[in-house]
């Protein structure tokens, strides 16, 4: 005889099967991270984290707006990064440079010449494609595989292969594709009232925040009286006219970066690089991201940017639904050893073999004078560069949990790290038609607000209110009930365990602040 009963305990749904004469129990482990990005897209829209941009006019490809909870989450990610990077260390200064810089910055950084993707058009359906993402055609005899990592010959080889009909359009399957051509990813605009044809007014929206740091190296060095090693951190928007944006907020044309350039003596760069790789990995786990969902990816030589000696990416398992493990991962952050490329290229000093200045436009020399060693040189740079939006996506995916309640109903809990949770506490009246309870609940919310982000909500029954707060990641709910009017105490409910504790109103603030820090 087989009978089954349903129950639950913290963290797991339980089915107790009794197969006569021996009863045994199977624990169904709950869903501990989001099964795919789509789950987060739907939660984000439903609960007000992220909305498709310009939706009432049909949207704008890959642009997203951050709603009331999304903006708090982004701000909390940025604050956590800034606290860790700038406040908790003694060797980093902050900066906020312009988004629109002199065009010469992008000439000497190499972006005007090299910051491009190889673009291909499908003549059949007119889809624009990235040549390095093309699929092989089904006709195996036509197939010439092109080594994408061999970047020097990549364009030539892929042109040959496309002409041999070796690649197909992923949209319509046609092999009638144009030759690839480089497509520069920088957004162009014009400053002032000059005409759009006037080349002298051409500027770009920055594709990385890093260059604003390099061109301010001497300013920060002088005003902060720093000595090597030291770093400059910056958070801000960057823009890339991506050919194939997508996967929600993973790849967009407008996004935010958190970048830090750490300046060291040449020769000390390799150990500093390794230290930052370790530190960055630890930072992501300190935000609550599961370590098994993170991995390091050593960029092969052929993949390195023109300025990099070595780059290690921290990848997150953004695509857990894909069957092949290798395709589940993508970049969350890059940590590059940029050598002295940037400070050198923006300096007026360096000359070639014929004593010709390499940069005839710069008015400054960005070298460093080491007083102790009486030596002048260009510092090497280690650059941890993370995306705010990809970090937000990773923490949302990682925090996503499903749990079954006593009634067998599925509940979503967003187990966000308390530092990242958009709302820290929700104050809920058990009876919204009882003025004394409502007044007490509102006054508790007001008293907590200066110390932590608190909200008051009476728009549903208590079960519904708890479920809503669980789904947006609020660590604590405070319930004011009839008894509160007698005993000056409230019920505090824990998001993750659903355990409840009775706490005196007078002790509530201290209790919550302590619990949020543990
Ligand atoms: N200064 C170096 C630099 O910009 P990157 O690897 O191109 O390096 C750093 O960018 C980080 O910025 C990436 O790891 C990613 O998190 C984020 N990022 C880059 N392009 C992005 C895009 N189109 N959409 C969203 N985030 C992006």
Image (cartoon, rainbow, N blue to C red):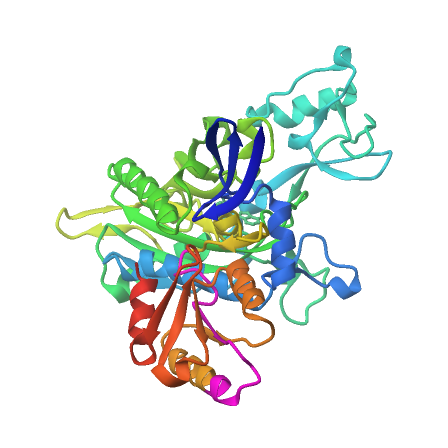
User: Residue 431 falls in which quadrant of the image?
Assistant: bottom right
At 39% from the left and 61% from the top, the residue drawn is 419
Residue 101 is at least partly visible in this image: no
At 35% from the left and 45% from the top, the residue drawn is 280
User: Residue 516 falls in which quadrant of the image?
Assistant: bottom left
* Front one among 35 and 70: 35
Report the quarter where the N terminus lies. Answer: top right
Q: Position of residue 211 (x, y in %)?
A: 45, 53
| Position of 341 relative to 507 (above/below) | above
Q: Position of residue 344 (x, y in %)?
A: 38, 46
Q: Position of residue 13 (x, y in %)?
A: 50, 43
Residue 380 is at least partly visible in this image: yes
* Front one among 464 and 90: 464
Judge whether residue 269 is colored magenta. no
Marks counted in the figure total 0
Report the quarter where the C terminus lies. Answer: bottom left
| Position of 479 relative to 317 (above/below) | below
* Front one among 245 and 462: 462
Q: Position of residue 278 (x, y in %)?
A: 31, 40
Residue found at the very far left of the displayed protein: 372
| Position of 137 relative to 410 (above/below) | above
Judge whether residue 427 is colored magenta. yes
For residue 21, side relative to residue 461 (left or right): left
For residue 51, side relative to residue 357 (left or right): right
Q: Which residues are magenta?
A: 417-439
Residue found at the very far right of the displayed protein: 124
* Front one among 233 and 454: 454
At 31% from the left and 45% from the top, the residue drawn is 279
């Amino acid at each position: 005889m087989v009978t089954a009963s349903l129950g639950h305990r913290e963290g797991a749904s339980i089915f107790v099967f009794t197969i006569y004469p021996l009863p045994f129990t199977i624990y169904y482990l709950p869903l501990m991270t989001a099964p795919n990005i789509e789950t987060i897209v739907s939660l984000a829209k439903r609960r007000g984290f992220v909305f498709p941009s310009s939706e009432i006019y049909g949207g704008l490809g890959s642009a997203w707006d951050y709603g009331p909870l999304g903006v708090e989450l982004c701000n909390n990610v940025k604050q956590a990064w800034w606290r860790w990077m700038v406040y908790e260390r003694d060797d980093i200064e902050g900066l906020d440079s312009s988004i629109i810089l002199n065009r010469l910055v992008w000439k000497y950084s190499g972006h005007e010449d090299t910051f491009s993707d190889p673009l291909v058009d499908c003549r059949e359906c007119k889809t624009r494609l990235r040549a390095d993402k093309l699929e092989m055609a089904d006709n195996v005899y036509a197939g010439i595989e092109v080594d994408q990592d061999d970047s020097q010959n990549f364009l030539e080889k892929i042109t040959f292969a496309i002409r041999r009909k070796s690649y197909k359009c992923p949209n319509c399957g046609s092999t009638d594709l144009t030759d690839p051509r480089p497509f520069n990813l920088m957004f162009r605009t014009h400053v002032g009232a000059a005409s759009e044809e006037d080349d002298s007014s051409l500027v770009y929206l920055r594709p990385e925040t890093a260059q604003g740091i390099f061109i301010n190296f001497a300013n920060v060095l002088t005003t902060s009286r720093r000595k090597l090693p030291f770093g400059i951190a910056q958070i801000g928007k960057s823009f890339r006219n991506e050919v194939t944006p997508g996967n929600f907020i993973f790849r967009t044309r407008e996004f935010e970066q958190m970048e830090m350039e750490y300046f060291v003596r040449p020769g000390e760069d390799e150990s500093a690089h390794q230290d930052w790789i370790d530190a960055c990995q630890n930072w992501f786990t300190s935000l609550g991201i599961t370590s098994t969902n993170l991995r390091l990816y050593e960029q092969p030589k052929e993949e390195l940017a023109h300025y990099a000696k070595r780059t290690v990416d921290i990848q997150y398992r953004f695509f857990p639904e894909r069957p092949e493990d290798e395709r589940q991962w993508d970049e969350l952050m890059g940590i590059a050893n940029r050598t002295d490329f940037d400070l050198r290229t923006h300096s007026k000093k360096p000359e070639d073999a014929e004593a010709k200045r390499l940069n005839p436009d710069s008015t400054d020399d960005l070298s460093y004078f080491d007083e102790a060693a009486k030596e002048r040189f260009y510092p090497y740079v280690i650059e941890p560069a993370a995306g705010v939006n990809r970090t937000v996506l990773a923490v949302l995916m990682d925090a996503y949990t499903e749990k079954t309640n006593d009634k067998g109903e599925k509940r979503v809990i967003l187990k966000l790290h308390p530092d990242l949770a958009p709302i820290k506490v929700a104050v809920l009246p058990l009876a919204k038609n009882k003025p004394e309870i409502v007044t007490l609940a509102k006054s508790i919310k007001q008293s907590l607000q200066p110390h932590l982000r608190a909200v008051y909500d009476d728009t549903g029954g208590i079960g519904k209110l708890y479920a809503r707060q669980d789904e947006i990641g609020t660590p604590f709910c405070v319930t004011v009930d009839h008894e509160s009017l007698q005993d000056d105490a409230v019920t505090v409910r824990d998001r993750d365990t659903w355990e409840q504790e009775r706490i005196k109103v007078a002790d509530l603030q201290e209790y919550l602040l302590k619990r949020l820090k543990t």
